[in-house]
Amino acid sequence: MKKIISTLIVTFSMMVSAEVGVKVDKIDSNQDTTISIQKGRATVHKRYLLAEGEQEIVGDVDVVRKSAEMNWKKECNEWRKEFRADNRDNKIISVSCGRMKCNKDGVETTCASTAKYKVKTLAEE
């Protein structure tokens, strides 16, 4: 009876202990080696780079200076809206239409500025 029980215990313990199938072939054992097993996804660290740029914003020509300024403001707001439409991943750091300067050519006035932006971009590895 004792032999049967001891045989069952040994057999049961062999069934419970499962072999983990980790292959360590082709690993140089001359150097220190660490094998790590983690549950879940591996953490990926993203690297970002800062990119800066400029773009010229020009409003429509108008005879009245106030209307020319409003045309520039409309162009500035439209540029900002288009620029921010691609901001799903919080890429934009700063956006500025710059300082408006109006030039009068005869009776027509044109307002323009140099817009500046700063965005972060994902670095390729």
Image (cartoon, grey):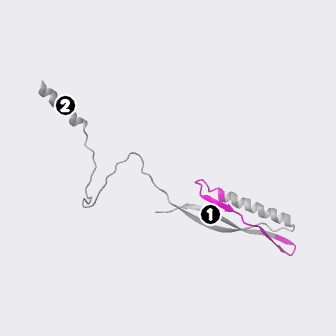
Q: Are marks 2 and 1 in contact (CB under 8 Å)?
A: no
Please give the name of the residue rendered at 70% of the width and 61% of the height, measured from the top-left corner: 79
The residue that disc 1 covers is 118
Q: Secondary structure at mark 1?
A: strand
Give residue 108's quadrant in the image: bottom right
Q: Is residue 87 above or below residue 39?
A: below
In the rendered structure, which segment of residues is drawn in magenta? 83-109
Q: Read off the residue under disc 2.
A: 9
Q: Quadrant of the N terminus?
A: top left
Give amino acid for label 2. Answer: Ile
Position of residue 24 relative to residue 103, above or below, is above
Is 30 in front, or is 122?
Answer: 30
Where residue 122 appears, as percent x and y from the top left, is: 53, 60
Q: Position of residue 16 (x, y in %)?
A: 25, 35
| Residue type at the position of mark 1 | Lys
Does 106 appear in magenta? yes
Disc sitting over residue 4 in the figure: none
Q: Residue at x 61, y 66 (%)?
A: 52
Question: Quadrant of the rendered structure where residue 74 is?
Answer: bottom right
The residue sitting at 62% across, 58% down in the picture is: 92
Residue situated in front as seen by the camera: 36 or 85: 36
Neighbours of disc 1 within 10 Å: few (<14), some (14-19), many (20+): some
Around disc 2, counting alpha carbons within 10 Å, would you say few (fewer than 14), some (14 to 19), or many (20 or more)? few
